[in-house]
Image (tube, grey):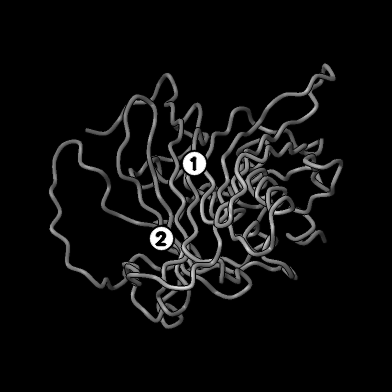
């Protein structure tokens, strides 16, 4: 069985050119195209190959231009935009060879790497809404807050251990919610996860985290509003921002993720996922704007 480190590995073709070792995988049964997290992970891994070991990825933001196919490898072209004493910045373009032998752009992003600073003026982290320590929380095989579509993640499940957190969880904060006809869903999805792979380098560990963090965010707006994905005619990520607050991350250990949606309209929706370690330290955030079109015969609930 192919492990995640192999699935997201890259090999060098030239000074600023890389190719994925494997074609990207599908997420599951509901989509025939490649899982976006696989494309993102390969892009991150390729960018890491062009920077010094003294700098660490803290931000990668970009757009999914075209869905990648699963029967051919990903090609990564890296542009070196900035190299200073403290920052190294890269533009990443990921493409595939089309059926007409012409190269088609699938993904473009800007990745920024930062030197480890000797001191910080302030140090803090927000807590998750899930009770800590999360090693003691109740788990359920299928949480009510977890997408119910059968086979949704079947092609990536063998790379990960995932345990959805039960809906009835404690929270650290009492929040005042304002309800109205168009208020965003107040629910959140939570699960424990870890990667099953021998991740040796920082590039592999951060790329593996990127692989996971794309999972499900495009589907959260429909699911948290109580609609099955079969009511959608299109559901795909348009743009994303992955922010890392430390490079000291080992996704082979158990971590906690929570995902929410904040706003939706014009067939688009905005969602965010956050990841904490076992101590409650916030490690990373992924925000996405996604396309969510209803089917022609779709009738929203009143």
Q: Above or below — where is 298 with respect to 142?
A: above
Q: Above or below — where is 222 with respect to 260?
A: above
Query: Of the residues tagged 2 and 1, which is closer to the observer?
Result: 1
Q: Position of residue 56 (x, y in %)?
A: 59, 60
Q: Residue furthest front?
A: 85
Secondary structure found at label 2: strand
Does 96 sit left or right of 277 as displayed? right
Q: Give the mark, 2 or 1, whose residue is nearer the N terminus.
A: 1
| Res. 258 mark | 2
Q: Nearer the viewer, residue 271 or 46?
A: 46
| Res. 23 mark | none
Does 64 sit left or right of 68 as displayed? left
| Figure disc tally | 2
Q: Residue at x 72, y 48 (%)?
A: 46
Screen quadrant of the N terminus = bottom right
Q: Residue furthest top?
A: 100
Q: Which residue is mark 1?
A: 240
Q: Residues within 10 Å of mark 2 (few under 14, many from 20)?
A: some
Q: Above or below — where is 228 with respect to 294?
A: below
Distance between mark 2 and mark 1 Cα atoms: 17 Å
Secondary structure found at label 1: strand
């Amino acid at each position: 069985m192919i492990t995640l480190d192999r699935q997201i590995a890259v090999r060098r073709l030239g000074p600023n050119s890389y190719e994925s070792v494997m074609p990207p995988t599908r997420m599951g049964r509901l989509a025939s195209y490649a899982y976006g997290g696989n494309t993102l992970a390969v892009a991150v891994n390729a960018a890491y190959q062009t920077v010094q070991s003294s700098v660490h990825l803290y931000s990668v933001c970009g757009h999914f231009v075209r869905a990648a196919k699963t029967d051919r490898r990903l090609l990564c072209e890296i542009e070196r935009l900035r190299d200073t004493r403290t920052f190294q910045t890269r533009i990443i373009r990921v493409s595939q060879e089309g059926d007409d032998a012409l190269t088609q752009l699938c993904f473009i992003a800007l990745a920024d790497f930062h030197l480890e600073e000797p001191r910080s003026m302030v140090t803090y982290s927000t807590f998750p809404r899930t009770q800590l320590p999360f090693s003691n929380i109740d788990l359920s095989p299928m949480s009510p807050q977890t997408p119910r579509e059968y086979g949704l993640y079947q092609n990536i499940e063998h790379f990960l251990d995932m345990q959805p957190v039960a809906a009835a969880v404690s929270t650290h904060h009492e929040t005042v919610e304002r309800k109205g006809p168009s208020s965003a869903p107040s629910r959140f999805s939570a699960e424990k996860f870890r990667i099953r792979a021998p991740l040796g380098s920082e590039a592999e560990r951060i790329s593996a985290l990127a692989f996971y963090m794309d999972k499900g965010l495009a589907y959260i707006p429909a699911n948290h509003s109580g609609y099955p994905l079969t009511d959608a005619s299109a559901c795909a990520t348009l743009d994303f921002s992955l922010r890392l607050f430390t490079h000291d991350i080992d996704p082979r250990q158990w971590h906690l993720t929570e995902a929410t949606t904040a706003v939706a309209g014009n067939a688009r929706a905005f969602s965010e996922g956050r990841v904490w370690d076992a101590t409650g330290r916030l490690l990373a955030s992924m925000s996405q704007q996604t396309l969510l079109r209803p089917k022609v015969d779709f009738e929203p609930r009143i």
